[in-house]
Amino acid sequence: MKKVCIFGGTFNPPHIGHLIMANEVYHALDFDELRFMPNAKPPHKEASNLVSGEQRLHMLQLATEPFSYFQVEPLEIERGGLSYTFDTMNELKSRESQTQFSFLIGADMISSLDKWYKIDELVEEVNLIGVRRPGFEERSDYPVTLIDAPLIDLSSTTLRNRFKEGKDVSLLLPENVQTYIRQEKLYE
């Protein structure tokens, strides 16, 4: 059975912190593949400065290009509307019945799992993987496999602000993603 980890998020924009976290999880748990899946409309975030789904998919394709084991999953963008993990994972499981899926979440999401849509059913179907982050509560009533990974104090919000302010973003996200953002004037 193929082992696939889905890494969901807004990825607005994707950055090296996302890549490092995904790489550590991929190797630590011996997955066959790790897929970055941008959500169309996250139910837990205000999406006022969200660039289009197609633009985020493109940035992820650029960011993951050098890694053969990273893929980009367009399902939630193609489906549109609110992106609920339970619905998405059910759709993936029906599409790929011979695949064992896991879902990667950041430590910031672990303490709020009880607020997730159909969380009890989700944990019956999918393994949840969390990456430890200093300053975040990692206890949960739900089963979460915790992984240690080198952490960079970086967020997509910080990057958007740096682009807007014309500050240097070298080394904070892949060069091809930086070039695309500047060409398209995404966060000005």
Image (cartoon, helix red, strand yellow):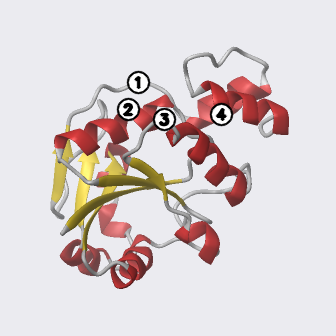
Q: Secondary structure at mark 1?
A: loop
**Mark 1 or 4, closer to the camera:** 4
Residue to which mark 2 is pinned: 20
Disc number placed over residue 77 in the picture, else none = none
The answer to the question of whether label 1 and label 3 lie on touching residues, with beta carbons closer than 8 A, is no
Viewer-nearest of discs 4 and 3: 3
Q: How far is mark 1 from mark 4, CA to CA?
A: 18 Å
> Depth-wise, is mark 1 or mark 2 nearer the camera?
2
Residue 85 left/right relative to 182: left
Q: Quadrant of the N terminus?
A: bottom left
Q: Residues within 10 Å of mark 2 (few under 14, many from 20)?
A: some
Q: Hey, what amino acid is under mark 1? A: Ile
Residue 152: assigned label: 1
Disc 3 on helix, strand or loop?
Answer: loop
Q: Does residue 187 appear to the left or right of 157 in the view shown?
A: right
Tell me which amino acid carries mark 3: Pro
**Quick check: marks 1 and 2 in contact, CB under 8 Å?**
yes
Q: Is residue 160 above or below residue 73?
A: above
Give the x, y percent position of residue 27: 22, 40
Q: Secondary structure at mark 2?
A: helix
Identify the secondary structure beneath mark 4.
Answer: helix
Q: Tell me whether the residue at label 2 lies in contact with that at label 3, contact meaning CB atoms closer than 8 angstroms.
A: no
Residue 70 drawn at (x, y percent): 41, 47
Q: How many residues crowd around disc 3 within 10 Å: few (fewer than 14), some, or many (20 or more)?
A: few
The relative height of residue 94 versus residue 34 in the rendered view (above or below) is below
Task: Report, in whole angstroms, how far the alpha carbon at label 4 lies from the one at label 2.
Answer: 16 Å
Mark 1 / mark 4, whichever is N-terminal: 1
Residue 50 horizontal/vertical position (percent): 70, 52
- The circle drawn on residue 66 is 3
Q: Which mark is residue 177?
A: 4
Foreground of the two, 112 or 69: 69
